[in-house]
Amino acid sequence: MKNSAPLALDLAGIKMNSPLVAASGCYGYGFEYGTWVDLREWGAIALQGTTLHPREGNRPPRLAETPSGMLNAVGLQNPGIKHFLQEVRPRLGELGCPVIANIAGESVAEYRELAAILDGVDEVSAVEINISCPNVRLGGISFGRDPVAVGELVSAVRGTYRGPLIVKLSMEASDLVAVGRAAESAGADALSLINTLKGMVIDIAARRPFLGNLTGGLSGPAIRPVAVRAVWEMAVAVRIPLIGMGGIASAEDALQFILAGASAVAVGTANFIDPHIAREINSGLRRFLEQEGLDHYSELIGAARDCPESR
Ligand SMILES: Cc1cc2nc3c(=O)[nH]c(=O)nc-3n(C[C@H](O)[C@H](O)[C@H](O)COP(=O)(O)O)c2cc1C
């Protein structure tokens, strides 16, 4: 018998109607889209990154178009946690789906403080810690590279936040799997991967880097094969669920991540092209399940590993 909710899941305690997550930084606080998009198409919405103090972000230009992707150096511009509590929190009920707060700090103490504040916020279903933003100089990146530092950071946050804790990994780590394992051992409930990849575009007329920040984070279809590979490798290394992301713009793209071992998938850059992308991808996933005669998408998680070459 067909399952009545073939896309529903419980991801580390987050009850989701679909494995699709709106990726942090690419969907604002969600409610900006609420008048013209049915937000319940999302299994969860990861809010834009929040820091302890307001941040103005990097100097412009902050965006550059690249082949099959874009380079951004927004630099975690956000109004800070106080504004979040006063202005954003009261509106989170409008979203109609679970909310994941994404946090970034400049020190372990800042991450701890943010997590402690969010522990008391019922409207937030989970916290995602960004240890990996490639275009913030003082920010998470220094944590994200080193398994020992990641372990310490995650333990510290785990000590103050009791809900589902997601750690968002950086490809800047020389040994990504070691970082993922360190996060798991320190108490992470799920891993998000991947964040953007550090890149640069040169303005040849000006003879200088195009972005005000010099470098930025590459996202979109250009990074998808790197992201699928990262999920593939992480899936055998840890037992906690993975949220795969990087260049997903269709159900077929999402299926690649699921078959590689992701339990859920996030969509970032594709929202800028098609704000209704969640509806499209959900329909495509349902169609695929029907074609394949499957009851639930979870039957596909990691199924690509069954090929003889990977045994
Ligand atoms: C403009 C922009 C802002 C982003 N801001 C954040 C952020 O605040 N926190 C975070 O963890 N990731 C952030 N990301 C990374 C995305 O959540 C995602 O990991 C990455 O873009 C890869 O997915 P995509 O190719 O579907 O965009 C940002 C990405 C973009 C393009």
Image (cartoon, rainbow, N blue to C red):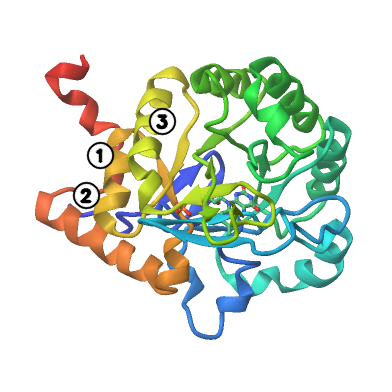
**Are the residues flagged by discs 1 and 3 in contact, CB closer than 8 Å?**
no
Mark 1 to mark 3: distance in Å? 21 Å
Give the residue pinned by disc 2: 295
**Are the residues flagged by discs 2 and 1 in contact, CB closer than 8 Å?**
yes
Instruction: Point out which mark residue 230 bears.
Output: 3
- Quarter location, residue 26: bottom right
Amino acid tagged 3: Ala
Whole-percent x, y for residue 264 in the image:
42, 45
Mark 2 to mark 1: distance in Å? 8 Å
Give the residue pinned by disc 1: 299
Where 107 sits versus 182, above or below? Answer: below
Mark 3 to mark 2: distance in Å? 27 Å
Can you tell me whether the CB of the residue at mark 3 lies under 8 Å from the nearest atom of ligand 1? no
Q: Nearer the viewer, residue 2 or 269?
A: 269
| Secondary element at image label 3 | helix
Whole-percent x, y for residue 184 in the image:
59, 23
207 relative to 123 in the view: left or right:
left
Count neighbours of disc 3 (C-alpha within 10 A) and say few if under 14, some if 14 to 19, many if 20 or more: many
Residue drawn at the location 69% of the way across and 24% of the way down: 150
